Amino acid sequence: MRELLGNRNGKTAGGGGTGRRVLVQVFVLALVTAVGLVLGGPGAGSADAASSCGGRLAKTVTFSTGEVRIFRSRSYACAITVAKKPGPRRKMSVMIQVRGGRPVADSGMFTKQTGRVTVHALHRCVRAAGSVAGKSGATGWILC
């Protein structure tokens, strides 16, 4: 590896060039970070931030104050609850369960959506439920 980092005189790096190399690495890292913030920004991505789950949208269950979205990848199922109108913090929850397994849930006070909950669901049925401010929606066994 040191042979690859040699300078013009054929000497290997490790002596006087180390400080300059670290400085260049720091500069490159700062530049990449700055470009990422300009192009991507902290709010980059789709306006529908619900894509925190991987895979394709398999089912959506709507209710008066929001909806539960279930995503499916090859071997995982994921669910989130999204409020119809973002607003002040309110009680929200989401749950997903694979048939024969324990439910995985996330609940708390949120403004727009609950965090994602994921289960391993290769060749297994799942069910999901969610609520926003006391109103809820649920699926039966799906994705079988």
Image (spheres, rainbow, N blue to C red):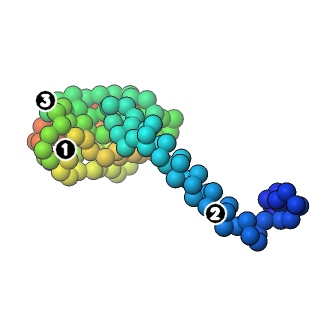
Q: Give, as a three-letter code, the residue at label 1.
A: Thr
Q: Quadrant of the N terminus?
A: bottom right
**Pick the front one: 143 or 39:** 39
Q: Is residue 142 left or right of residue 111?
A: right
Kindly identify which residue carries mark 1: 111
Mark 1 packing: few (<14 Cα in 10 Å), some, or many (20+)? some
Kindly identify which residue carries mark 3: 64
Q: Give, as a three-letter code, the residue at label 3.
A: Ser
Q: Which residue lies at the image location 31% right of the left edge and 46% below the top edge? A: 115
Q: Which mark is residue 65?
A: none
**Pick the front one: 46 or 91:** 46
Whichever of callouts 3 and 2 sits on the residue coming sooner in the sequence is 2
Kindly identify which residue carries mark 2: 22
Q: Which residue lies at the image location 13% right of the left edge and 29% below the top edge? A: 64
Q: Quadrant of the C terminus?
A: top left
Element type at mark 1: loop
